[in-house]
């Protein structure tokens, strides 16, 4: 994941080339990190965690009984 972020930063900085200040470069990196984070949250999951939660609840109920 970190390598992907580094690759995106490299691609975007090649397009911009010159940043007027250090803050503008940091702003670009933050925006990319937020974008990648949002994409990761919305991405299709390979494991459905709802099934795991239900299994844990059933296991706890069985232990309590």
Image (cartoon, rainbow, N blue to C red):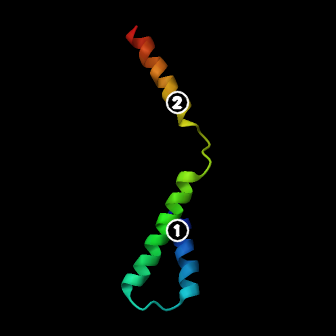
Image coordinates of residue 11 in percent, x first then y, are 58, 79
Q: Residues within 10 Å of mark 1 (few under 14, many from 20)?
A: some
Which residue is the extreme one toward the top? 65
The label shown at residue 5 is: 1
Looking at the image, residue 54 lies above or below residue 35? above
Q: Nearer the viewer, residue 1 or 45?
A: 45
Image coordinates of residue 63 in percent, x first then y, are 41, 12
Q: Which residue is mark 2?
A: 52
Q: Residue at x 38, y 89 (%)?
A: 21
Looking at the image, residue 27 lies above or below residue 65? below
Looking at the image, residue 38 lies above or below residue 50? below
Query: How far apart, in angstroms, are the residues tagged by discs 2 and 1?
Result: 30 Å
Q: Residue at x 58, y 86 (%)?
A: 15
Q: How many marks?
A: 2
Image coordinates of residue 10 in percent, x first then y, are 55, 78
Q: Nearer the viewer, residue 43 or 46?
A: 43
Q: Nearer the viewer, residue 39 or 59?
A: 39
Looking at the image, residue 63 lies above or below residue 32? above
Quadrant of residue 47 in the image? top right
Please give left or right for residue 23 compared with residue 48 in the image.
left
Q: Residue at x 46, y 74 (%)?
A: 29
Looking at the figure, which quarter contains the C terminus? Answer: top left
Please give left or right for residue 51 compared with residue 56 in the image.
right
Q: Residue at x 47, y 24 (%)?
A: 56
Q: Secondary structure at mark 1?
A: helix
């Amino acid at each position: 994941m970190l390598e992907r972020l580094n690759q995106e930063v490299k691609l975007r900085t090649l397009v911009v080339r010159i940043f007027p200040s250090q803050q503008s470069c940091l702003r670009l990196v933050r925006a990319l990190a937020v974008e990648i984070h949002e994409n990761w949250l919305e991405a299709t999951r390979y494991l459905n965690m709802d099934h795991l939660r239900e299994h844990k609840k059933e296991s706890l109920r069985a232990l309590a009984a």
